[in-house]
Image (spheres, rainbow, N blue to C red):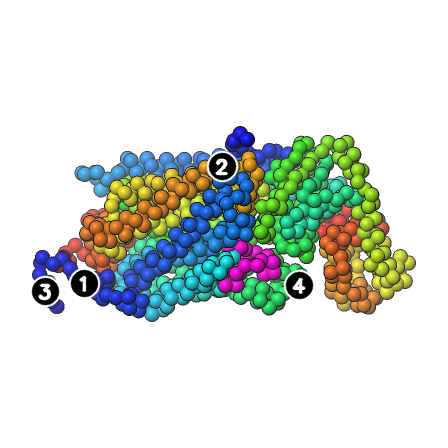
C-alpha cells in the first residue's frame, strides 16, 4: 500500500479508481452504473419536462393556437412515454437502488454485476428507439396505446415507440431479478430480514412487481405490433378482436407499474424520516409488511381504470372493493411515518423538507384515489383532468419528491461533496409551491368536466388553466435549480464527511465516496435498523480506525 | 370576454346531486385527513426540531393496538365509500323501463344521433326534461366516450358492440357534450351540446323534420333495398327465419345452444351470419359487412324490434 503524503487528501474511491470513457462504459461497479442511469434518466426527465412545458403553453389559451392538433397529441404522448417508462419507473430503483442496495446490506456489489451493466445498455437502447420514433415524427396514441386507435388508425411511429418500451422492459426485469437475488443471498452476517432497512423491503417488493408484471406489458406490446404490422385480429373488432382485451392487458401491468414507482419512493421516505428524526421508524414490521401487501394487492386492481369501458358491472364492483383494500396499507405507512416524528429529534435539512412535501402530496394524491375508486363518482371524473391531477400528485408529488429528497440525502455518499444547503431549501420550497399551483387547479378542472388530452377547450376553463401553466413555470425553475447546483457541487461543493447526517445505516459506515468494493471489511450487523438508542452517534462500529484522508 | 372562475359544474340531471353528495363527502374527508397529517407533521417538526442541547429522540413502546386502529378505521371508511359509490354505479347501469331510446354513433370526430321518431342530428342531442333517456351507442372506428359533465354521466363507445348510458335531465338548458376517450387528431373537436328542452318544446322539435320517416321506417326500407325479404319471408317459408316478434325472445341454435335475440345478436347475424345459425336453417346467408353503415344497422334493428311485440327485456343488451 502506498502511503500518501498527508498534504494530498486524495485516496482511492470508486470515482477515481480508474479514468476514461471506457472505464465507465465497461464498469461492473453498481455505483458507477447508478451514475450512468442518473445521467440517462436526467436526460429523459428534462426531455419529458420540455414536452410538459409545451403542453402547458398550448393550454394557456382555449384555442389550439400554438401547435397543431397532431403535434399536441404527440407532445402529451411523448411526455407520458418519456416520463413513465424512461424516468419514473427507473428513477429510484435504478439510480438510488442500484447505488444503495449493496451498500445497505453490506455487500460488495449486486449479485450479477455484468447483468447490471447489461440492464443499463438495454435501457439505453430502448430509450434510443423511443428517441428515434420521436425524431422521425413522434407517436400520437397517448402513453396508453389504446386499441384499435393504435393498431389501425394512428399514422405515427407506434411500433418504434412500443419496441423501445419493450426493450426497456427487459432492463426492468433484470434489475428486479438482480435485487431479489442480492437481497436474498448477499446480506452481511447478522443482517436478518427484520434488521433490514425499510428501503430494502420496499425495493424487494417493487422488484417482485418488476419481475412478475413487466413480461405482461412485453406480451401486450408484441400483440399490438402483430396486429398493427400483420393485421392479425386481436384487439380491433373489424379484424375480429376485442379492444377491451387490450385495456385489461395494458392495465394488468400498468397499474402495478404505479407501485414500481411509488414503493421505492416510500423506501426513500422511510430512510429519510428515520435519519432526520434519529429514530426507529414507528411500526417497522407493519411498514415492511405494508410494502409487500401493496405489491400483492396491486396486481388485483387493474380494472379500476375501466369502470366506464363497457366491462361488466360486477367486475367493476370487485375491482372497486379491491382498490379500497390496497388503500389501507398506504394509509398505514403515512400514519407510521407521522408517528415516527413524534418525540423525535428532527433535523430540518433539505431531505426532510422533501419528505414533508412527499407526505403532504402523497396524502392528497392517495385520498383523491378514493374519489376515483368510488364507482359512481368515477363515472363523472374518469378521463378528466381530475385523473391527471391525481396521478401527478402520486407520481410527481410522490415519486419525484422522494427521488429528489433521496438524491440530496445520499449525494454526499455518491459524490463525496455536499450540495449548497440554503439554495437546496429554496429549491425544495419552489418545487412544492410550483407543484401545487400546477396540479391543484386541475382537480377543479376535472370535476368541472374538462376531458384530458384536449388540445382546445371551452373558454370557461381558461382561468384554471392559466393558473396551472403559471405553476408549471415555477415548477420548472424548481427542477432546474437542483440540476445546476448538483453539477456545481461536484467541483465546488464542501467535501462531505463519511456520515454527514449521523445516520446508522451501513452505507454511512463506509467512506464518502465509497471504495470500489464498498467496504474494507464486510461489517457484521448486531443491531436492528435505525437503532439510534444503542448507537447514538450513528456509528455502528464506533472503534473502527478512521481512514487516512 | 371577462374571465370567469367556475369551481363547480352545473347540476342538470337526476344523478348530479347524488354524485355531488359523495364528492362533497370525499372532499371533506380529504380535507380532514390532509389537515390532520399535514398539521401533525408541521407541529412535530417545529416542536421536536433538533437544536443544540435538545434531548435525543424518545422511542415509544409500539403497541399493536395503534396499528390496528389506523388500519381498521381507514378500512371501514373505505368500505363505506365503496358501498356508496357502488350504489350510484348500479343505478347508472339500470335504465328505467320507460326510458326513451335514442341511438348514437361515434366516429372520428363527430357524434351522430338518431331519434326513434326520425330526426337525425350531428354533435347535438335534443332531449326532454323530466324523462329518462337511454342512449344505445356504438362507434364506427375507434373507442370514444360519451360524456356530459352537467349530467355526471359517461360511457365508452366501442366499435363492434353496443353500450348504453342513461340519464334524466332535470333542468332545461344547453350542456357540453364531450368525447372523453382519446380518439385521434381532432379528439378535442369531437364536442357538441345536449339541449334539454321542456316536454312541449321537445315534441315540437321532434316533429319538425321527419320527412325521411321514423327510424323503423328507414330500417324497413333498408331491409327491402338489401333484399332481406327474399329469404326472411314474413310467413316463415324462406331460407331464413321470419323476423316478426323475434326480438327479445330466446331462440334455439344449430348445435343446441340458445341465444337471446337482442341488438348484439342482430348485429352479429348481419355482419357475421354464420357465427350463430338458428336451428333448422342452413348457413347460407352472405355477410352484409361493408354494405351497411352503423346507423343503417341501428335502423334495421329498430325495424326488427318494431315488427314484433316489444318486450321490456330489451334493456338486457348492456353487458
Chain to which mark 1 belongs: A
Q: Earlier in the sequence, mark 3 or mark 1?
A: 3
Left or right, B139 with reference to A539: right
Q: Earlier in the sequence, mark 4 or mark 3?
A: 3
Q: Nearer the viewer, residue A516 or A483?
A: A483
Q: In the structure shown, which secondary structural element does the residue marked by tag 1 occupy?
A: loop
Q: Earlier in the sequence, mark 4 or mark 1?
A: 1
Task: Name the spot of residue A194 as percent of width and height, x first.
Answer: 32, 56
Give the CA separation, mark 4 to mark 1.
Answer: 64 Å
Instruction: Name the residue beneath numbered marker 3.
Output: A3
- Bin the neighbour count of mark 2 within 10 Å (Cα to Cα): few under 14, some 14-19, many 20 and up: many
Q: Nearer the viewer, residue A229 or B268?
A: A229
Left or right, B49 with reference to B105: left
Q: Dots 2 and 1: beta carbons under 8 Å?
A: no
- Check chain identity for marks 2 and 1: say if they share one: yes
Task: Name the spot of residue A448 as percent of width and height, x first.
Answer: 55, 37
Instruction: Name the residue beneath numbered marker 2.
Output: A464
Q: In the structure shown, which secondary structural element does the residue marked by tag 2 occupy?
A: helix
Instruction: Name the residue beneath numbered marker 4.
Output: A240
Examine the rendering and report whether any part of residue B46 can be seen: yes
- Give the number of the mark in front: 2 or 1: 2
Amino acid at each position: 500500500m502506498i502511503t500518501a503524503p498527508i498534504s494530498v487528501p486524495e485516496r482511492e474511491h470508486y470515482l477515481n479508481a480508474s479514468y476514461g470513457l471506457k472505464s465507465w462504459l465497461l464498469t461492473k461497479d453498481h455505483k458507477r452504473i447508478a451514475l450512468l442511469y442518473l445521467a440517462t434518466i436526467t436526460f429523459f426527465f428534462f426531455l419529458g419536462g420540455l414536452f410538459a412545458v409545451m403542453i402547458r403553453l398550448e393550454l394557456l389559451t382555449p384555442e389550439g393556437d400554438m401547435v397543431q392538433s397532431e403535434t399536441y397529441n404527440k407532445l402529451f404522448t411523448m411526455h407520458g412515454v418519456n416520463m413513465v417508462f424512461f424516468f419514473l419507473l427507473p428513477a429510484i430503483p435504478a439510480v438510488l437502488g442500484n447505488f444503495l442496495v449493496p451498500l445497505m446490506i453490506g455487500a460488495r456489489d449486486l449479485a450479477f454485476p455484468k447483468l447490471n451493466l447489461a440492464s443499463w445498455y438495454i435501457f439505453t437502447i430502448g430509450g434510443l428507439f423511443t428517441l428515434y420514433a420521436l425524431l422521425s415524427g413522434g407517436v400520437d396514441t397517448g402513453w396508453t396505446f389504446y386499441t384499435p386507435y393504435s393498431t389501425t388508425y394512428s399514422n405515427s411511429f407506434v411500433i418504434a415507440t412500443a419496441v423501445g418500451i419493450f426493450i426497456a422492459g427487459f432492463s426492468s426485469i433484470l434489475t428486479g431479478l438482480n435485487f431479489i437475488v442480492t437481497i436474498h443471498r448477499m446480506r452481511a452476517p447478522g443482517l436478518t430480514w427484520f434488521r433490514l432497512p425499510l428501503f430494502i423491503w420496499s425495493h424487494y417488493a417493487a422488484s417482485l412487481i418488476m419481475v412478475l408484471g413487466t413480461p405482461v406489458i412485453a406480451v401486450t406490446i408484441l400483440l399490438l405490433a402483430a396486429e398493427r404490422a400483420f393485421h392479425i385480429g386481436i384487439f380491433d373488432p373489424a379484424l375480429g378482436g376485442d379492444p377491451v382485451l387490450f385495456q385489461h392487458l395494458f392495465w394488468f401491468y400498468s397499474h402495478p407499474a404505479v407501485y414500481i414507482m411509488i414503493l421505492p419512493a416510500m423506501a426513500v421516505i422511510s430512510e429519510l424520516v428515520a435519519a432526520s428524526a434519529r429514530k426507529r421508524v414507528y411500526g417497522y414490521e407493519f411498514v415492511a409488511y405494508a410494502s409487500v401487501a401493496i405489491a400483492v394487492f396491486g396486481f388485483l386492481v387493474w380494472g379500476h381504470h375501466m369502470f366506464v369501458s363497457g366491462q361488466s358491472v360486477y367486475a367493476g364492483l370487485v375491482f372497486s372493493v379491491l382498490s379500497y383494500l390496497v388503500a389501507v396499507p398506504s394509509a398505514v405507512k403515512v400514519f407510521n411515518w407521522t408517528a415516527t416524528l413524534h418525540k423525535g429529534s428532527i433535523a430540518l435539512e433539505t431531505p426532510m423538507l422533501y419528505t414533508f412535501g412527499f407526505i403532504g402530496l402523497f396524502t392528497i394524491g392517495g385520498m383523491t384515489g378514493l374519489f376515483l375508486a368510488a364507482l359512481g363518482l368515477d363515472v363523472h371524473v374518469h378521463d378528466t383532468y381530475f385523473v391527471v391531477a391525481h396521478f401527478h400528485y402520486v407520481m410527481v408529488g410522490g415519486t419525484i419528491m422522494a427521488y429528489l429528497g433521496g438524491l440530496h440525502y445520499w449525494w454526499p455518499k455518491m459524490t463525496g461533496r455536499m450540495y449548497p444547503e440554503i439554495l437546496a431549501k429554496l429549491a425544495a420550497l419552489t418545487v412544492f409551491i410550483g407543484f401545487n399551483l400546477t396540479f391543484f387547479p386541475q382537480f377543479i378542472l376535472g370535476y368541472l368536466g374538462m376531458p384530458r388530452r384536449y388540445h382546445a377547450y371551452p373558454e370557461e376553463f381558461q382561468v384554471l388553466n392559466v393558473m396551472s401553466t403559471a405553476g408549471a413555470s415555477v415548477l420548472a425553475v424548481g427542477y432546474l435549480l437542483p440540476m445546476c447546483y448538483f453539477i456545481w457541487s461536484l467541483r465546488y461543493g464542501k467535501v462531505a464527511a463519511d456520515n454527514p447526517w449521523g445516520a446508522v445505516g451501513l452505507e454511512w459506515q463506509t467512506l464518502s465516496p465509497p471504495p470500489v468494493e464498498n467496504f474494507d471489511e464486510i461489517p457484521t450487523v448486531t443491531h436492528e435498523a435505525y437503532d439510534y438508542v444503542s448507537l447514538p452517534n450513528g456509528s455502528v462500529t464506533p472503534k473502527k480506525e478512521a481512514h487516512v484522508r | 370576454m371577462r374571465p370567469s372562475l367556475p369551481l363547480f359544474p352545473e347540476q342538470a340531471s337526476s344523478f348530479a346531486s347524488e354524485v355531488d353528495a359523495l364528492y362533497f363527502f370525499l372532499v371533506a374527508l380529504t380535507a380532514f385527513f390532509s389537515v390532520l397529517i399535514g398539521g401533525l407533521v408541521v407541529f412535530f417538526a417545529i416542536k421536536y426540531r433538533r437544536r443544540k442541547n435538545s434531548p435525543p429522540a424518545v422511542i415509544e413502546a409500539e403497541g399493536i393496538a395503534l396499528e390496528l386502529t389506523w388500519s381498521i378505521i381507514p378500512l371501514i371508511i373505505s368500505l363505506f365509500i365503496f358501498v356508496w359509490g357502488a350504489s350510484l354505479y348500479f343505478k347508472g347501469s339500470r335504465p328505467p323501463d320507460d326510458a326513451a331510446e335514442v341511438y348514437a354513433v361515434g366516429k372520428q370526430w363527430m357524434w351522430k344521433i338518431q331519434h326513434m321518431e326520425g330526426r337525425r342530428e350531428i354533435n347535438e342531442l335534443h332531449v326532454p326534461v323530466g324523462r329518462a333517456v337511454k342512449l344505445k351507442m356504438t362507434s364506427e372506428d375507434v373507442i370514444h366516450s360519451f360524456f356530459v359533465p352537467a349530467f355526471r354521466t359517461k360511457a365508452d363507445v366501442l366499435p363492434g358492440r353496443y353500450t348504453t348510458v342513461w340519464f334524466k335531465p332535470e333542468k332545461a338548458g344547453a350542456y357540453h357534450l364531450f368525447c372523453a376517450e382519446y380518439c385521434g387528431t381532432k379528439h378535442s373537436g369531437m364536442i357538441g351540446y345536449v339541449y334539454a328542452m321542456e316536454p312541449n318544446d321537445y315534441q315540437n322539435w321532434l316533429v319538425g323534420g321527419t320527412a325521411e320517416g321514423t327510424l323503423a321506417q328507414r330500417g324497413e326500407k333498408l331491409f327491402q333495398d338489401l333484399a332481406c325479404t327474399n329469404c326472411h319471408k314474413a310467413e316463415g317459408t324462406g331460407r331464413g327465419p321470419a323476423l316478426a316478434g323475434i326480438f327479445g325472445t330466446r331462440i334455439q341454435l344449430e348445435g343446441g345452444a340458445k341465444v337471446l335475440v337482442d341488438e348484439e345478436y342482430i348485429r352479429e347475424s348481419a355482419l357475421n351470419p354464420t357465427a350463430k345459425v338458428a336451428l333448422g336453417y342452413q348457413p347460407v346467408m352472405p355477410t352484409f359487412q361493408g354494405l351497411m353503415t352503423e346507423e343503417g344497422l341501428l335502423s334495421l334493428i329498430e325495424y326488427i324490434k318494431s315488427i314484433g311485440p316489444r318486450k321490456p327485456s330489451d334493456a338486457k343488451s348492456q353487458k
